[in-house]
Amino acid sequence: GGIAHDFNNILSALMGYAALLQMKMEEKDPLRSFVDEIVSGSQKAAELTRSLLAFSRQQPITFFTLGVKDIVTGIEKLLRRLVTEDVAIKTILAADQPVIRADATQIEQVLLNLATNARDAMPNGGSLLIETRITELDETFVRSHGYGEPGRYALIAVSDTGVGMDEATRQRAFDPFFTTKEVGKGTGLGLSTVYGIVKQHNGYITVYSEPNIGTTFHVYLPIEHRIVPREKQTAAAAKEVRGGTEVILVAEDNQAVRNLMKDVLTQYGYTIIEAVDGADAVDKFKKADHVDLLILDSVMPKRNGRETYNEIHSLTPDVRVLFISGYTRDVILNKGIEDNRFPFLSKPIQAIALLNKVREVLDQ
């Protein structure tokens, strides 16, 4: 969590200022394409961070309606570079494209991990087959997994002609840190990461394998009934941005992130009071005439976000709060911040997401 936290702070400043530039520039500005590339690159870096944190199974993810066929074809070139030349890749994709609500980067990570697993199972070459189709899951299947709903699901099947697994190995395939590879060749986190991502999408994953014949993983993801291009969904969110005139106290120990939030929020009319840590936040709150909202980094020197909120809440019980953090949610839970009780925004901070979340909390 610590490395990701630092990386998310750096990304917050990069993404935030690039997005702020993007929002202020005209579409025809000759420099607009350069800014667009910065935004795109930083978003990919943020998506990579989310993928690396997926094993925690608590990292917030961003859902869009997506075509399964589009995801597979979009990552096919990368898969071909991932496997060795003696592994043949074939895809059989459903004509009636299944549509799911998912984080594209996370589903790509699932495919990458399964393809890596298949490659390692075929040291002397073989075949890797990826199939997509729509299937029905009944009450019995759902009940055996202990969660979810019966109905129509998109199925992604990844099959190899590798060494296969015996039943004892198959039973432990998704266990964290379980691996059949040599020391130094693998962490044993690949398939447990896949399991975590699929479950976070309210889906299922099963594995069938026979020694010396091969292995097939079945990934089931709930079907959506309509697809909206990701670009349109992002553009729609941008158009909905509203500012305000409220007073917001921002407590964040990282200066770059603090400056970013101040710059974004003041651009949209808010008055900002800055604090460098929890103790400073309490002091600034006591001196302020009025504060409408607290934005608190969950992990700060002197007082963490929850301790800061508790002290301020004892002074002004109706004060509103928004917690932010670059740590994974398991760390946040240990700090006493619960997602279902308090509004929460994960780093790296994106300008539009920050503005929308602030407005949402203030309007509650």
Image: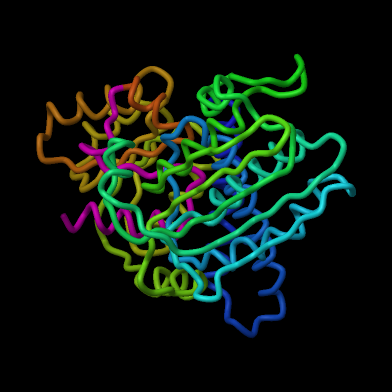
Residue furthest to the top in view is 183
Give the colour scheme of this rendering: rainbow
Question: Which residue extends farthest left?
Answer: 317
On-image quarter of the C terminus: bottom left
Q: Is residue 147 visible?
A: yes
Residue lying farthest bottom?
A: 28
Q: Is residue 74 magenta?
A: no
User: Which quarter of the picture shows residue 34?
Assistant: bottom right
In front here: 212 or 189? 212
- Left or right, residue 107 beside residue 60: right
- Image position of 327 (left or right of 150): right
Residue 42's spot in the image, x, y percent? 63, 53
Is 237 above or below relative to 258?
below
Q: Position of residue 330 (x, y in %)?
A: 40, 26
Residue appearing at x 44%, y 53% in the figure: 62
Rendered view: 53 above or below 102: above
Q: Position of residue 334 (x, y in %)?
A: 34, 20
Specify the quadrant of the image occupied by residue 239: bottom left
- Between 133 and 33, the one nearer to me in the picture: 133
Q: Residue at x 39, y 56 (%)?
A: 265
Q: Exactly how many numbered labels are in the figure?
A: 0
**167 or 44, which is in the foreground?**
167
Q: Residue at x 24, y 46 (%)?
A: 293
Residue 283 visible, this orientation:
no
Instruction: Locate residue 113: give its quadrant.
Output: top right
Q: Which residues are magenta?
A: 336-364
Lateral position of residue 35 relative to residue 155, left or right = right
- From the top left corner, tell me how far across and down residue 76 is, in percent: 72, 59
Residue 360 falls inside the magenta stretch = yes
**Location of residue 324 with respect to 308 vertically, above or below:** below
Residue at horizontal 66 percent and vertical 66 percent from the top: 35
Is 23 left, or right, of 331 in this rendering?
right
